[in-house]
Image: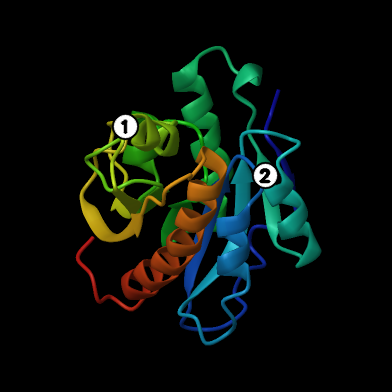
Amino acid sequence: MPASSSADPTAGARVPGRARLVVLASGAGTLLQALLDAGTDFPGEVVAVGTDRADAHALDRADRVGTATFTVPPKAHADRAAWNLALLEATRPHRPDLVVCAGFMRILGAAFLDGIGCPIVNTHPALLPAFPGAHAVRDALAHGVKVTGSTVHLVDAGVDTGPILAQEAVPVLPGDTEATLHDRIKITERRLLLSTVAELCNGERDQ
């Protein structure tokens, strides 16, 4: 089953000089929304949104502003390697200068990492290297830490092991649940993602 897509990937030369961002997301797309709302003064522009799920709300957010979308469901491919190659083939036509994993719950493999030809960044709701993986907020609470936070890092072949670009601490408050703590981390996460992506787009950070 091929990836599904909408809009013309070659129609993205909207504002000269702005970096082309492809955002990968799996769920609600709140981090994506922060990038979509950043305005024309922001040095990067979201030219496409890719998902691994056809029901991801991130697709609705992109559709509302006329941004191209594509979906590459893992179950439609024989194995992880085939899925990574399909994701690469769906992403590359959008000519990204930067790929942003914003709540993307899949591990990118060698085909994508080696083939995309641009930096890839990810956000993570913990102060890496502490609490990598999909349950960082729950794990922080289970370990009884007093401070956790948000990290933006470059993506490599490991799970949340790439070079760290930016971090910001978030205190764990008495009575915090996974939901309340995650909500506060998300506020920090959005701000940190925007500032880090802007610096990358402006060439102010090593990639």
Locate the N terminus and report the quarter of the image it occupies. Answer: top right
Name, please, the residue furthest toward the bottom.
41
Circle number at residue 84: none
**Quadrant that contains the C terminus:** bottom left
Residue 197 on image: x %, y %: 39, 67
The residue shown at (50%, 48%) is: 182
Q: From the viewer's perspective, is residue 149 above or below residue 143?
A: below
Front-most of residues 112 and 187: 187
The answer to which of marks 1 and 2 sits earlier in the sequence is 2
Return the x and y of residue 26 as percentages of the image width and height. Answer: 60, 39
Query: Which secondary structure, mark 2?
Result: strand
Dot label at residue 159: 1
Lateral position of residue 73 relative to residue 166, left or right:
right
Q: In the depicted view, which residue is nearer to us: 50 or 162?
A: 162
Residue at image point 70% right, 62% down: 67
Q: In the drawing, does residue 80 fall left or right of residue 14?
A: left
Q: Which residue is mark 2?
A: 70
Name the residue located 74 percent from the left edge and 35 percent from the top edge.
Answer: 54
Q: Amino acid at mark 1?
A: Val
Q: Identify the image's colour scheme: rainbow, by chain, secondary structure or one colour.
A: rainbow
Residue 179, given in percent of the width and then of the height, sits at 56, 43
Q: Residues within 10 Å of mark 2 (few under 14, many from 20)?
A: many
Q: Position of residue 8 (x, y in %)?
A: 71, 58
Determine the residue located farthest toward the top in the rendered image.
Answer: 78
Q: Residue at x 32, y 39 (%)?
A: 114
